[in-house]
Amino acid sequence: NAGVTQTPKFQVLKTGQSMTLQCAQDMNHEYMSWYRQDPGMGLRLIHYSVGAGITDQGEVPNGYNVSRSTTEDFPLRLLSAAPSQTSVYFCASRDQGRDTQYFGPGTRLTVL
Amino acid sequence: EDKVVQSPLSLVVHEGDTVTLNCSYEVTNFRSLLWYKQEKKAPTFLFMLTSSGIEKKSGRLSSILDKKELFSILNITATQTGDSAVYLCAVLSSGNTGKLIFGQGTTLQVKP
């Protein structure tokens, strides 16, 4: 099993550009989520999904969109990047019946 | 509003010291509390606690949960430089849309 994979590992954008961060898992987990991590603030939940076709907002959803067309994939879209979105983004997944969440390796995003 | 607070935010010790990291929480519909270790990459799972007063132990690391007082501690004995990391506490709320809410993290530096 590859676990949770994320691409790209690094990305630099200019203000106003759009992009999609990719996340995939091969563990057949129903629950997937996106977090951002900023210095001194731990991980904050952006969006999450409890299964294909079902998504919901977390603590800091503004400026981000998600969709979940398959169990495996959960992409995060930045519609118009802003410097405030400079952060490290982690995707995570877990089995609905279990509590342990597995994290991808992260994407370091810089918005100039 | 659900929240998880960790203390101290940072800590510097010398090899061989014992450290205690604290995590307090106010979360509706508590399901479990998890500890993660993060070393410049994705968080890795350490412990999950669901029952009060039962210590989880793994080598030099141990953790306990007090559900009455709403806190948990993570102890590391005989610290080593390899223990240097950010330690994250997170609380999972119950239900199908259960969210994992993180504290700010404690940055531990172990000096030789």
Image (tube, coloured by chain):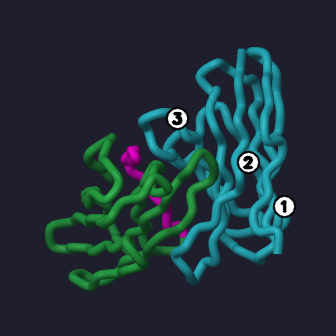
Chain colours: A cyan, B green
The disc numbered 3 marks a residue on which chain?
A
Q: Residue at x 40, y 63 (%)?
A: B91
Query: Where does residue B22 sit, x and y in percent of width and height?
Result: 26, 57
The quarter holding residue A50 reads bottom right
Query: Where does residue B46 sit, x and y in percent of width and height?
Result: 48, 70
The answer to which of B29 and B14 lies nearer the viewer is: B14
Is B101 magenta? The answer is yes
Three-letter amino acid code at disc 2?
Answer: Val
Does residue A62 sit above or below A59 in this rendering? above
Does residue A84 sit above or below B33 in this rendering? above
For marks 2 and 3, the one nearer the N-term is 3
Does residue B13 sit above or below A97 in this rendering? above
Of helix, strand and loop, which one carries label 3?
Answer: loop
The label on residue A38 is 3
Three-letter amino acid code at disc 3?
Answer: Asp
* Part of the protein shown in magenta: B97-112
Q: According to the image, label 1 marks what residue?
A: A69
The disc numbered 1 marks a residue on which chain?
A
Residue A79 seen from this side: yes
Q: According to the image, label 2 marks what residue?
A: A66
